[in-house]
Amino acid sequence: MDFTAKFTQLQQYFSHNKTRDLAWRKQQLQQIKRLVVDNESAFLSALATDLGKPAQEAWMTETSYVASDVDHTCKRLHRWAKKRSVSTPLVAQPGRSYIQPEPQGTVLIIGAWNYPLQLILAPLVAVIAAGNCALVKPSELAPTTSALLAKLIPQYLDKNAVSVVEGGADETTALLALPFDHIMYTGNGQVARIVMAAAAKHLTPVTLELGGKSPVYVDDSADLNITAQRIAWGKWMNAGQTCIAPDYILCSKRLVTPLTTALKAQIINMFGQEPKQSKSYGRIVNQRHTKRISDYLADQDIAVGGEFDLENRYIAPTIVINPARDSSLMSEEIFGPILPIIAIEDFAQAKAFVTMRDKPLAAYIFSKNKHQCQAWVHDVRAGNQGINDVIMFNAVPELPFGGVGPSGIGQYSGQAGFDNFSHLKSVLARPFIKDLPIRFAPYGKIKFKILRWLR
């Protein structure tokens, strides 16, 4: 398969400078909002089919998220796109220095299946805001949502500037062979390495939004009821298939039983005694992932849940106590509704436990001890952090979102997204005024002395 013609058409349209027009960008952004608002019922139905997403959860994390992102971006676009003046040192005077954001060109967006609408359209908001053309590839593992995006995007957006390709690994491989100006990929580290290797052939910059094992440390001072409610919401939203969901909990031995009890109470409050029957609890994306996750439960100390149904892609909200540190459950990102709780001695051991592992996409702490909270933020390296809550930093549009090291490269959301998909060009403008001779050859001791003083 060959997408060269489609790619070339986007490149040619970009070269006509239509996408540089801020009025065009705003109009396209509003069309993205119209796309999700006009077709909200269809998207909610598609997300229910693909992932069993409850309507309110899908609205909060997918359709409303995108609409709010458009509103935030449109209000600030003129300011973000303006020249950004910087100071000019004495040695370059008289002169005016500034940064001029400009579009990069044609961007490839490869979406993920866990939030198949948001993870296509939210990056697209940033890409369009920055004045680029885009080719989007929705995830084939959420086929209903993918088909709906492929149908609707050409109806709402400029077909010369935004194109859609559906498909799986073969289509993605063919797209990666093309010399895009930027590639945005959301998914797992294994595929990210393939994306990066393909991008390297064209020296194409990449934004990789990955994941990792996002830890939670719960201090003895934490309010257990509030802590349990917030962790339960973040962990079992989308049946645990969220890249910034709590992956495991660290707490003192004394806290293991009361915290488990509090979490179990919140599971019942949110999903009832039989979560399988709850309209507020989702499903695993497919049977292959259901088996992968359920296999983690072999030989584990299951305190809550543990039930699963491969045929119906169901795994109950599950809590496991003290799994082996070298088990698959603790060496791989779970990306499902299993929550291990690990007993540690103290805060220092919790930090050591986290810092000796790969840098995660998120790290959380629940504590009333301000000193410990500050130390956690300072000492634990992670893409994003939350104090006394989980996931909610993603609701703050001006907080850049992205990983570090194995959990990702680059950031987007708000101005960070605009900047990420822009080239921030440096400019120095000087008038035709005769320069002092000290800068030019022939050099000498006096010139050298003056230059050193000016520096």
Image (spheres, helix red, strand yellow):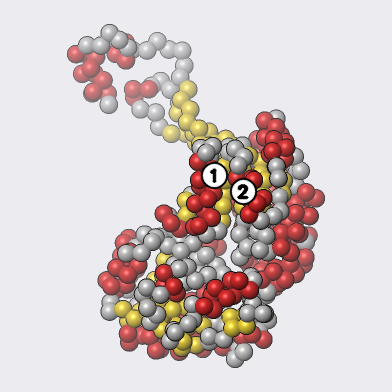
Which of the 4 image quarters holds residue 169? bottom right
Instruction: Relative to 368, say whether 136 is above or below.
Output: above
Residue at 57% from the left image edge and 46% from the top image edge: 183
Nearest the eye: 316 or 381: 316
Kindly identify the residue that appears in the image at 32 percent across and 72 percent down: 350
- Residue receiving disc 2: 173
Q: Is residue 397 left or right of residue 328?
A: right
**Identity, as a three-letter code, of the amino acid under mark 2:** Thr
The residue singled out by tag 1 in the image is: 198
* Residue 26, percent from left and from top: 69, 45
Q: Residue 312 or 72: which is nearer the viewer?
A: 312
Q: In the figure, is residue 322 to the left or right of 125?
A: left
Q: Residue at x 49, y 77 (%)?
A: 296
Kindly give the residue lying farthest to the right in the view shown.
155
Contact between marks 2 and 1 (CB within 8 A): the answer is yes
- Tell me if residue 274 comes above or below residue 372 in the rendering: below
Secondary structure of the residue carrying tag 2 is helix
- Label 2 – label 1 distance at C-alpha: 9 Å
Count residues near mark 1 (Cα–Cα under 10 Å), then give few for <14, some for 14-19, many for 20+.
some
Q: Residue 144: tell me if it is visible.
A: yes
Count of all numbered marks drawn on residues in the image = 2
Is 285 above or below relative to 163? below
Tell me the quadrant of the picture where the C terminus can be found: top left
Q: Residue furthest top?
A: 442
Q: Residue at x 32, y 64 (%)?
A: 356
Residue 369: x %, y % from top left: 32, 73
Q: Position of residue 106 (x, y in %)?
A: 63, 39
Query: Where 369 sits versus 14, above or below?
Result: below
Residue 208 seen in this snapshot: no
Relative horizontal placement of residue 333, taking residue 54 as reference (left or right):
left
